[in-house]
Image (cartoon, rainbow, N blue to C red):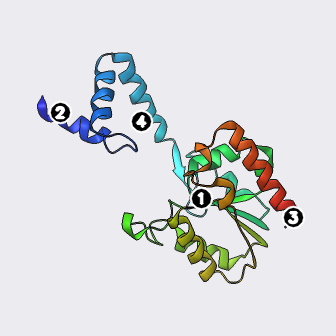
Amino acid sequence: MFDLYTQALTLLQRWPGIGPSASHRLLEFFLQDAQKNKTLHKLGNLMTSFKQCQKCHLYHAVTSECTNCLQSNTTTIMIITSPVDYFFCQQHHFFKKHRFFCLNGYVSPHQGKTLDNTNLNDIIDQLKYIPPQKLYLLFNQSLEARATTWLLRKNISEIHQIYECASLLREKEALHYLTSHDRDQYIESLSNLMNQA
């Protein structure tokens, strides 16, 4: 019994933001009610319905094609660092006409994030093959984001209009962490930037 308990705590602690105390609380939460276990099981089943696109690295339903890659407009491309941000962007008509690529986080040797496991090499190759007219980097102001931006600029000199949007996102990790008010301001600021470009 103790082994099962330890295994469950270890699995829960793999989730972002879940440490020893939170894992104990979550395990207690799930063990107290069988209905909550069913919800967790449903979530696990639902996650198998997603498939990662090998081109843009976003997720789509297993049963359909990647709608982002079907997007015919390749003149403007936006690069994000979280697939959840893409779902957020698709809720706003402003973003729907643009194509996206998704990094698996920022390059960070300290965290073991390289050009390969962040998808950066693959995205650079694709951008070199069909360079867009404009490239928007929806990154934050972290050191890792600045390093990732530098690597992109260094490796895709064919694209002359690269816009860094770090001052819009500031220190937030990703778009989906913004409050609704901040999101509206972000979209307005990005729209103004794009209209000036």
**Disc 2 from disc 4: Cα separation:** 19 Å
The percent coordinates of residue 93 (x first, y second) are 80, 45
User: What residue is at 44 percent from the left and 71 percent from the top?
Assistant: 114
User: What residue is at 76 percent from the left and 49 percent from the top?
Assistant: 187
The residue carrying pointer 1 sits among few (fewer than 14), some (14 to 19) or many (20 or more) residues within 10 Å by Cα, namely: many
Res 122 quadrant in image? bottom right
Location of the N terminus by quadrant is top left
Q: Which of 55/190 is in front?
A: 190
Label 3 vs 4, first from the N-terminus: 4
**Disc 3 from disc 2: Cα separation:** 58 Å
Tell me which amino acid carries mark 4. Answer: Gly
Circles 3 and 2, Cβ within 8 Å, touching? The answer is no
User: What residue is at 57 percent from the left and 54 percent from the top?
Assistant: 171
Q: SS for tag 3?
A: helix
Circles 1 and 3, Cβ within 8 Å, touching? The answer is no
Label 1 vs 2, first from the N-terminus: 2
Circles 3 and 4, Cβ within 8 Å, touching? The answer is no
Location of the C terminus by quadrant is bottom right
Outermost residue on the right side: it is 195
The percent coordinates of residue 95 (x first, y second) are 76, 51
Residue assigned mark 4: 44
Label 4 vs 1, first from the N-terminus: 4
User: What residue is at 53 percent from the left and 62 percent from the top?
Assistant: 142
Q: SS for tag 4?
A: helix
Tell me which amino acid carries mark 2. Answer: Leu
Tell me which amino acid carries mark 1. Answer: Asn
**Disc 1 from disc 2: Cα separation:** 40 Å
The percent coordinates of residue 159 (x first, y second) are 73, 78
Tell me if residue 116 comes above or below residue 139 in the rendering.
below
The residue carrying pointer 4 sits among few (fewer than 14), some (14 to 19) or many (20 or more) residues within 10 Å by Cα, namely: few
Label 2 vs 4, first from the N-terminus: 2
